[in-house]
Image: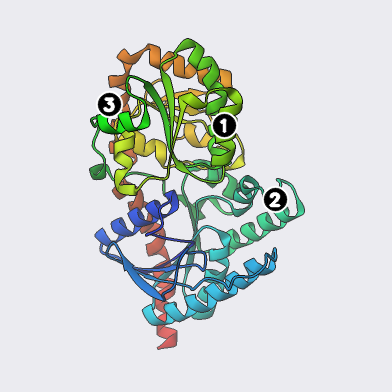
Amino acid sequence: MRILHILDHSIPLHSGYTFRTRAILREQRRMGWETFHLTSPKQLDCTVDEETVDGLRFYRTLPMPTARRRPGLDEWALMRRLEARLEQVAREVRPDILHAHSPVLNAAPALAVGQRLGIPVVYEVRAFWEDAAVDHGTTAEGSLRYRLTRAYETRALKRADHVFTICEGLRTDIVARGIAAHKVTVIPNAVDIDAFEPGGVADNALKIELGIVGATVVGFIGSFYAYEGLDLLLASLPALLRLRPDVRVLLVGGGPQESALRSQAQALGVADSVVFTGRVPHADVQRYYDLIDVLAYPRHSMRLTELVTPLKPLEAMAQGRVLVASNVGGHKELIRDGETGCLFAADDADSLTAALDALLEHRDQWPQMRAAGRRFVEVERNWRASVMRYALPYEALLPRRAVTRRAQA
């Protein structure tokens, strides 16, 4: 079986999106399938037509010429550029299936090329483009742009031969748009168990460098997007410090909210208790995980977080970490409150303070919680089991491709 994946971006860029993709490709190849990979013009710092990264060959679509922002027209031009490159690559590698991954800017070109060349198209939804735009501040829920984007997304879902998605929240939303339930398969986020070892010893030299020797560390590692709720974590800190003066918040990474978070820490008078490391090399991330006593995932409640499951809590559980998270839908699909982690009421700073205080008060329960989290990912959320779910929908589409090939011969 030959699958051509159409991607927004890929490694060597680092994001939850690229890490999920890499895991999928690795497991599909272990299953004996041939995979080919094309990225959109949104691949940053792209200057070549093809390159090999971590043993995977990627076809690239060169970026759009720099120009002033033209809402709507830019997206149309991007899709036309990707469509032309995709047709070129598809004619070269002759795939059995075109597998387009979010956003719909990738799905629409795939559907056009698939129709011309007679290749089945599957569409994998990791999040809805319209909801991501709300979080980025480029539109508002219910606006004309939001409604048009949603309609375009729904049209792509209806035209695809099969739809994959990452969690039950998104599957429910997709079926509610009129897509037959048997046409939608969940490929849940998972982890590579072999890549994570429970525990880890804190690097004392790094503790000294960051000024957290002797502190109880509540931390977050990742990109600082508004939906992650790091502002809520800082809002909960003054009350937590009154209860536990030794607490320090460690924020590892960077992103659009970094400046606002630094200003918030100053305004709250807690800047001395918050450590911003900036972005760190991927090879060093484990050293920072080992400094943290409790990982915090305080995501705000919105469509994006209610529907979409993140990767980071699964990675934390694979490492046997203790974690606290808001009770948004995406977290509730992953975390069993009081068993594999601790949930608090989303958007409620007092609830987060209380959850952290209770968790720190009952450290005797941590070994059991760590073991339960590790067990959960080992049994239910490993990539091999997850990727096996592609097999039946893929295989059901192969006879159609075989007919097209015979007609073209």
- For the C terminus, the image quarter is bottom left
Going by the numbered disc 2, the residue's amino acid type is Thr
Residue 367: give x, y in percent of width and height: 28, 20
Whichever of labels 3 and 1 marks the residue nearer the N terminus, that label is: 1
Q: Which mark is residue 131?
A: none
Please state which of the two labelled residues, at mark 3 or mark 1, is closer to the viewer: 1
Residue 304: give x, y in percent of width and height: 58, 43
Please state which of the two labelled residues, at mark 3 or mark 2, is closer to the viewer: 2
Residue 339 position (above or below residue 275): above
Residue 131 position (above or below residue 58): above
Mark-to-mark CA distance, 3 and 1:
30 Å
> Residue at 54% of width from left, 18% of height from top?
238
Q: Which mark is residue 231?
A: 1
- Crowd tier of the residue under label 3, counting other residues whose Cα lies within 10 Å: few below 14, some 14–19, many 20 or above: some
Depth check, front residue: 326 or 154: 326
Whichever of labels 1 and 2 marks the residue nearer the N terminus, that label is: 2
Residue 142: give x, y in percent of width and height: 74, 47
Extreme right residue here? 144
Depth check, front residue: 11 or 326: 11
Residue labelled with disc 2: 139
